[in-house]
Image (cartoon, rainbow, N blue to C red):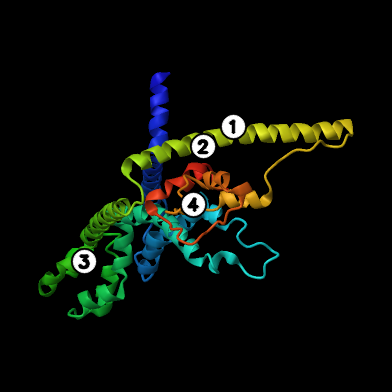
Amino acid sequence: MEKLHTVVNFCIRYQKTLGYSIVSLLTIASEQIFSSVAFRCPCNSWNTLYGCVFLLVPALLLFLLGYMVNARTWLLLTGSCPQEKKHCCGFGEKGCFYLKVLASVTASTLVAPLTWIAVALLSASFYECAASGSSLIRHRVCRDIDKLTACRELLEKIPCDEKVVGQLLNENSASKVGLVSFRAQSQILGWLLIVTIIIVALISTCISRCFSPVSYLQLKFWKIYLEKEREHFETKAKEHAAQLAERNINCFFEATNPPPFQTPSNDNWQKISFPYAFSKNNQYYSMIHKYANASRGNISTVSEGDQICSALEFVDEAHTSEQAF
Protein backbone atom coordinates (compact mmCIF):
# COMPACT_ATOMS: atom_id res chain seq x y z
CA MET A 1 0.00 0.00 0.00
CA GLU A 2 2.88 2.33 0.83
CA LYS A 3 4.49 1.64 -2.55
CA LEU A 4 1.22 2.40 -4.32
CA HIS A 5 0.95 5.68 -2.41
CA THR A 6 4.52 6.54 -3.49
CA VAL A 7 3.69 5.81 -7.13
CA VAL A 8 0.54 7.96 -6.93
CA ASN A 9 2.47 10.85 -5.41
CA PHE A 10 5.12 10.53 -8.12
CA CYS A 11 2.45 10.64 -10.85
CA ILE A 12 0.80 13.69 -9.28
CA ARG A 13 4.11 15.51 -8.88
CA TYR A 14 5.22 14.88 -12.45
CA GLN A 15 1.79 14.73 -14.09
CA LYS A 16 2.69 17.41 -16.65
CA THR A 17 5.84 15.61 -17.79
CA LEU A 18 4.06 12.26 -17.82
CA GLY A 19 1.19 13.78 -19.76
CA TYR A 20 3.53 15.13 -22.45
CA SER A 21 5.30 11.75 -22.61
CA ILE A 22 2.03 9.86 -23.07
CA VAL A 23 0.87 12.31 -25.75
CA SER A 24 4.17 11.92 -27.59
CA LEU A 25 4.04 8.11 -27.43
CA LEU A 26 0.45 8.04 -28.69
CA THR A 27 1.41 10.40 -31.52
CA ILE A 28 4.35 8.18 -32.50
CA ALA A 29 2.12 5.10 -32.48
CA SER A 30 -0.50 6.88 -34.60
CA GLU A 31 2.11 7.97 -37.13
CA GLN A 32 3.41 4.41 -37.46
CA ILE A 33 -0.12 3.11 -38.04
CA PHE A 34 -0.81 5.78 -40.67
CA SER A 35 2.50 5.07 -42.43
CA SER A 36 2.00 1.31 -42.63
CA VAL A 37 -1.77 1.07 -43.13
CA ALA A 38 -3.25 4.22 -44.65
CA PHE A 39 -0.40 5.81 -46.58
CA ARG A 40 0.16 4.76 -50.21
CA CYS A 41 2.06 7.23 -52.35
CA PRO A 42 0.34 7.49 -55.78
CA CYS A 43 3.68 7.92 -57.59
CA ASN A 44 2.27 10.41 -60.10
CA SER A 45 1.55 14.12 -60.30
CA TRP A 46 -0.33 13.93 -56.99
CA ASN A 47 2.82 13.08 -55.01
CA THR A 48 3.47 16.52 -53.52
CA LEU A 49 -0.10 17.21 -52.44
CA TYR A 50 -0.59 13.68 -51.10
CA GLY A 51 2.67 13.70 -49.14
CA CYS A 52 2.09 17.18 -47.69
CA VAL A 53 -1.44 16.26 -46.59
CA PHE A 54 -0.17 13.27 -44.57
CA LEU A 55 2.76 15.26 -43.20
CA LEU A 56 0.98 18.47 -42.18
CA VAL A 57 -2.79 17.93 -41.90
CA PRO A 58 -2.61 15.43 -38.99
CA ALA A 59 -0.25 17.86 -37.23
CA LEU A 60 -2.79 20.65 -37.72
CA LEU A 61 -5.59 18.44 -36.40
CA LEU A 62 -3.51 17.53 -33.33
CA PHE A 63 -2.80 21.23 -32.78
CA LEU A 64 -6.51 22.12 -32.86
CA LEU A 65 -7.38 19.10 -30.71
CA GLY A 66 -4.77 20.24 -28.21
CA TYR A 67 -6.63 23.54 -27.82
CA MET A 68 -9.92 21.70 -27.40
CA VAL A 69 -8.73 19.39 -24.61
CA ASN A 70 -6.62 22.00 -22.80
CA ALA A 71 -8.62 23.07 -19.77
CA ARG A 72 -6.91 26.47 -19.60
CA THR A 73 -8.51 27.36 -22.93
CA TRP A 74 -11.99 26.90 -21.50
CA LEU A 75 -10.97 28.41 -18.16
CA LEU A 76 -10.09 31.54 -20.11
CA LEU A 77 -13.05 31.64 -22.51
CA THR A 78 -15.99 30.27 -20.52
CA GLY A 79 -18.26 33.14 -19.57
CA SER A 80 -15.94 35.81 -21.00
CA CYS A 81 -18.53 37.06 -23.50
CA PRO A 82 -21.85 37.49 -21.65
CA GLN A 83 -24.86 38.12 -23.86
CA GLU A 84 -25.80 41.34 -22.06
CA LYS A 85 -22.58 42.97 -23.24
CA LYS A 86 -22.34 44.30 -26.76
CA HIS A 87 -18.77 43.22 -27.27
CA CYS A 88 -16.52 40.47 -26.05
CA CYS A 89 -14.41 41.66 -23.16
CA GLY A 90 -11.69 39.19 -24.05
CA PHE A 91 -9.83 41.58 -26.34
CA GLY A 92 -10.70 44.85 -24.62
CA GLU A 93 -9.05 45.81 -21.36
CA LYS A 94 -8.02 42.19 -20.76
CA GLY A 95 -6.66 41.63 -24.24
CA CYS A 96 -2.98 41.44 -23.30
CA PHE A 97 -3.76 39.13 -20.40
CA TYR A 98 -5.77 36.80 -22.65
CA LEU A 99 -3.04 36.70 -25.28
CA LYS A 100 -0.40 35.74 -22.70
CA VAL A 101 -2.52 32.85 -21.47
CA LEU A 102 -3.23 31.71 -25.04
CA ALA A 103 0.50 31.89 -25.82
CA SER A 104 1.17 29.54 -22.92
CA VAL A 105 -1.59 27.20 -24.06
CA THR A 106 -0.19 27.25 -27.61
CA ALA A 107 3.26 26.25 -26.37
CA SER A 108 1.89 23.16 -24.62
CA THR A 109 -0.41 22.38 -27.55
CA LEU A 110 2.54 22.23 -29.98
CA VAL A 111 3.90 19.05 -28.35
CA ALA A 112 1.73 16.61 -30.33
CA PRO A 113 1.94 18.24 -33.81
CA LEU A 114 5.71 18.75 -33.61
CA THR A 115 6.12 15.14 -32.46
CA TRP A 116 4.06 14.01 -35.46
CA ILE A 117 6.17 16.02 -37.92
CA ALA A 118 9.48 14.91 -36.36
CA VAL A 119 8.54 11.20 -36.39
CA ALA A 120 7.11 11.50 -39.90
CA LEU A 121 10.36 13.04 -41.13
CA LEU A 122 12.40 10.28 -39.50
CA SER A 123 10.30 7.58 -41.15
CA ALA A 124 10.72 9.55 -44.42
CA SER A 125 7.71 8.09 -46.23
CA PHE A 126 5.63 11.28 -46.35
CA TYR A 127 8.54 13.56 -47.21
CA GLU A 128 9.83 11.21 -49.90
CA CYS A 129 6.44 11.18 -51.59
CA ALA A 130 6.04 14.96 -51.37
CA ALA A 131 9.59 15.76 -52.53
CA SER A 132 9.46 13.39 -55.52
CA GLY A 133 6.67 15.51 -57.01
CA SER A 134 8.14 18.87 -56.07
CA SER A 135 8.56 21.24 -59.03
CA LEU A 136 11.76 22.63 -57.47
CA ILE A 137 13.41 19.20 -57.18
CA ARG A 138 12.11 18.22 -60.60
CA HIS A 139 13.57 21.34 -62.21
CA ARG A 140 17.00 20.93 -60.65
CA VAL A 141 17.31 17.20 -61.35
CA CYS A 142 15.86 17.08 -64.86
CA ARG A 143 17.12 20.33 -66.36
CA ASP A 144 20.29 18.69 -67.82
CA ILE A 145 18.52 15.55 -69.05
CA ASP A 146 17.32 15.41 -72.66
CA LYS A 147 14.14 13.40 -72.06
CA LEU A 148 12.46 15.81 -69.66
CA THR A 149 9.08 14.06 -69.50
CA ALA A 150 10.63 10.64 -68.91
CA CYS A 151 12.84 12.13 -66.16
CA ARG A 152 9.83 13.58 -64.36
CA GLU A 153 7.94 10.28 -64.56
CA LEU A 154 10.91 8.39 -63.15
CA LEU A 155 11.30 10.95 -60.36
CA GLU A 156 7.67 10.49 -59.33
CA LYS A 157 8.12 6.71 -59.18
CA ILE A 158 10.98 6.82 -56.65
CA PRO A 159 8.71 6.29 -53.58
CA CYS A 160 7.29 3.15 -55.18
CA ASP A 161 10.51 1.73 -56.63
CA GLU A 162 13.92 2.99 -55.53
CA LYS A 163 15.57 1.12 -58.42
CA VAL A 164 14.55 3.94 -60.75
CA VAL A 165 17.19 6.12 -59.11
CA GLY A 166 19.83 4.19 -61.02
CA GLN A 167 18.01 4.88 -64.27
CA LEU A 168 17.56 8.52 -63.41
CA LEU A 169 21.12 9.36 -62.41
CA ASN A 170 23.38 8.84 -65.40
CA GLU A 171 26.98 9.82 -65.63
CA ASN A 172 26.19 13.48 -66.35
CA SER A 173 23.89 13.84 -63.35
CA ALA A 174 25.93 11.87 -60.79
CA SER A 175 26.59 15.12 -58.93
CA LYS A 176 22.85 15.40 -58.22
CA VAL A 177 22.66 12.21 -56.15
CA GLY A 178 21.96 14.32 -53.03
CA LEU A 179 18.92 15.87 -54.66
CA VAL A 180 17.12 12.54 -54.95
CA SER A 181 18.24 11.14 -51.59
CA PHE A 182 14.84 12.03 -50.19
CA ARG A 183 15.01 9.58 -47.30
CA ALA A 184 18.33 11.02 -46.13
CA GLN A 185 17.02 14.58 -46.47
CA SER A 186 13.90 13.73 -44.49
CA GLN A 187 15.78 12.06 -41.65
CA ILE A 188 18.26 14.93 -41.40
CA LEU A 189 15.37 17.41 -41.19
CA GLY A 190 13.71 15.21 -38.57
CA TRP A 191 16.77 15.15 -36.33
CA LEU A 192 17.30 18.88 -36.79
CA LEU A 193 13.70 19.50 -35.76
CA ILE A 194 14.08 17.31 -32.65
CA VAL A 195 17.31 19.06 -31.64
CA THR A 196 15.69 22.46 -32.21
CA ILE A 197 12.67 21.53 -30.08
CA ILE A 198 14.86 20.32 -27.22
CA ILE A 199 17.08 23.42 -27.33
CA VAL A 200 14.10 25.80 -27.44
CA ALA A 201 12.37 23.90 -24.61
CA LEU A 202 15.54 23.97 -22.48
CA ILE A 203 16.18 27.67 -23.10
CA SER A 204 12.55 28.66 -22.47
CA THR A 205 12.48 26.60 -19.24
CA CYS A 206 15.71 28.21 -18.04
CA ILE A 207 14.40 31.69 -18.86
CA SER A 208 11.03 31.09 -17.16
CA ARG A 209 12.75 29.77 -14.03
CA CYS A 210 15.26 32.62 -14.08
CA PHE A 211 12.46 35.21 -14.14
CA SER A 212 10.34 33.34 -11.60
CA PRO A 213 8.98 35.81 -9.01
CA VAL A 214 9.50 33.28 -6.20
CA SER A 215 12.28 30.93 -5.13
CA TYR A 216 12.60 27.20 -5.78
CA LEU A 217 11.54 26.15 -2.27
CA GLN A 218 8.55 28.50 -2.34
CA LEU A 219 7.50 26.95 -5.65
CA LYS A 220 7.68 23.54 -3.98
CA PHE A 221 5.54 24.77 -1.07
CA TRP A 222 3.15 26.41 -3.55
CA LYS A 223 2.57 23.12 -5.37
CA ILE A 224 1.91 21.31 -2.08
CA TYR A 225 -0.60 23.99 -1.10
CA LEU A 226 -2.42 23.72 -4.43
CA GLU A 227 -2.63 19.94 -4.12
CA LYS A 228 -4.20 20.25 -0.66
CA GLU A 229 -6.50 23.06 -1.80
CA ARG A 230 -7.75 20.92 -4.68
CA GLU A 231 -8.40 17.98 -2.33
CA HIS A 232 -10.36 20.15 0.13
CA PHE A 233 -12.23 21.85 -2.73
CA GLU A 234 -13.37 18.52 -4.19
CA THR A 235 -14.41 17.21 -0.76
CA LYS A 236 -16.32 20.39 0.14
CA ALA A 237 -17.89 20.64 -3.33
CA LYS A 238 -19.20 17.07 -3.08
CA GLU A 239 -20.60 17.71 0.41
CA HIS A 240 -22.19 21.01 -0.63
CA ALA A 241 -23.68 19.54 -3.81
CA ALA A 242 -25.03 16.55 -1.88
CA GLN A 243 -26.69 18.81 0.71
CA LEU A 244 -28.22 21.03 -1.98
CA ALA A 245 -29.48 18.01 -3.92
CA GLU A 246 -30.95 16.48 -0.74
CA ARG A 247 -32.75 19.75 0.13
CA ASN A 248 -34.26 20.07 -3.35
CA ILE A 249 -35.36 16.42 -3.50
CA ASN A 250 -36.98 16.67 -0.05
CA CYS A 251 -38.87 19.80 -1.10
CA PHE A 252 -40.08 18.06 -4.25
CA PHE A 253 -41.39 14.92 -2.56
CA GLU A 254 -42.65 16.59 0.63
CA ALA A 255 -44.19 19.59 -1.18
CA THR A 256 -42.58 22.08 1.23
CA ASN A 257 -40.83 25.41 0.76
CA PRO A 258 -37.05 25.08 0.63
CA PRO A 259 -35.12 26.38 3.66
CA PRO A 260 -32.42 29.01 3.05
CA PHE A 261 -29.26 27.56 1.59
CA GLN A 262 -26.10 29.57 1.02
CA THR A 263 -24.28 28.80 -2.24
CA PRO A 264 -21.73 30.86 -4.23
CA SER A 265 -23.17 33.28 -6.76
CA ASN A 266 -22.42 33.13 -10.49
CA ASP A 267 -20.19 36.19 -10.12
CA ASN A 268 -18.15 34.57 -7.36
CA TRP A 269 -17.76 31.36 -9.38
CA GLN A 270 -16.51 33.47 -12.29
CA LYS A 271 -13.94 35.22 -10.09
CA ILE A 272 -12.33 32.05 -8.77
CA SER A 273 -12.44 30.42 -12.24
CA PHE A 274 -10.40 33.15 -13.97
CA PRO A 275 -6.77 32.32 -14.90
CA TYR A 276 -4.30 33.15 -12.16
CA ALA A 277 -2.06 36.23 -12.45
CA PHE A 278 0.80 36.98 -10.07
CA SER A 279 0.90 40.28 -8.20
CA LYS A 280 3.87 41.51 -6.15
CA ASN A 281 1.60 43.75 -4.08
CA ASN A 282 -0.74 41.01 -2.86
CA GLN A 283 0.73 37.56 -3.21
CA TYR A 284 -1.89 34.83 -3.35
CA TYR A 285 -1.40 31.16 -4.09
CA SER A 286 -4.60 30.77 -6.10
CA MET A 287 -7.75 32.60 -7.13
CA ILE A 288 -9.57 30.98 -4.19
CA HIS A 289 -6.85 32.30 -1.89
CA LYS A 290 -7.32 35.74 -3.42
CA TYR A 291 -11.09 35.50 -3.02
CA ALA A 292 -10.86 34.39 0.62
CA ASN A 293 -8.62 37.32 1.58
CA ALA A 294 -10.78 39.91 -0.18
CA SER A 295 -13.76 41.55 1.47
CA ARG A 296 -16.68 39.20 0.64
CA GLY A 297 -14.98 38.26 -2.60
CA ASN A 298 -14.73 41.87 -3.76
CA ILE A 299 -11.81 41.25 -6.10
CA SER A 300 -10.97 42.15 -9.67
CA THR A 301 -9.93 39.35 -11.99
CA VAL A 302 -7.13 41.43 -13.54
CA SER A 303 -5.49 44.26 -11.56
CA GLU A 304 -2.75 46.71 -12.40
CA GLY A 305 0.64 45.07 -12.00
CA ASP A 306 -0.67 41.52 -12.46
CA GLN A 307 1.47 39.37 -14.73
CA ILE A 308 1.38 35.95 -16.34
CA CYS A 309 4.47 33.93 -15.37
CA SER A 310 5.24 30.75 -17.25
CA ALA A 311 6.89 29.38 -14.09
CA LEU A 312 3.50 29.62 -12.34
CA GLU A 313 1.36 27.82 -14.93
CA PHE A 314 0.85 24.98 -12.46
CA VAL A 315 -1.52 27.23 -10.45
CA ASP A 316 -4.26 26.87 -13.07
CA GLU A 317 -3.30 23.30 -13.85
CA ALA A 318 -3.90 22.24 -10.24
CA HIS A 319 -7.66 22.66 -10.73
CA THR A 320 -7.82 21.95 -14.48
CA SER A 321 -5.89 18.68 -14.70
CA GLU A 322 -9.17 16.81 -15.14
CA GLN A 323 -11.10 16.55 -18.39
CA ALA A 324 -11.36 19.93 -20.14
CA PHE A 325 -14.99 19.59 -21.18
Mark 1 packing: few (<14 Cα in 10 Å), some, or many (20+)?
A: few
Q: Is residue 233 above or below residue 85?
A: above
The answer to which of 91 and 278 lies nearer the viewer is 278
Q: Kindly identify the amino acid type of the residue bearing the numbered disc 2.
A: Glu
Residue of label 3: 180
Query: Where's residue 15, x and y in %?
Result: 41, 39
- Cα–Cα span, label 4 and label 2: 15 Å
Which of pointers 2 and 3 indicates the residue nearer the eye? 2
Which of pointers 1 and 2 indicates the residue nearer the eye? 2
Mark 2 packing: few (<14 Cα in 10 Å), some, or many (20+)?
A: some
User: Can you tell which mark lies on residue 276?
Assistant: 4
Q: Quadrant of residue 158?
A: bottom left
Query: Where's residue 69, x and y in %?
Result: 51, 50
Q: Earlier in the sequence, mark 4 or mark 1?
A: 1
Q: Earlier in the sequence, mark 2 or mark 3?
A: 3
Which of pointers 3 and 4 indicates the residue nearer the eye? 4
Residue of label 1: 235
User: In the image, 287: left or right of 222?
Assistant: right
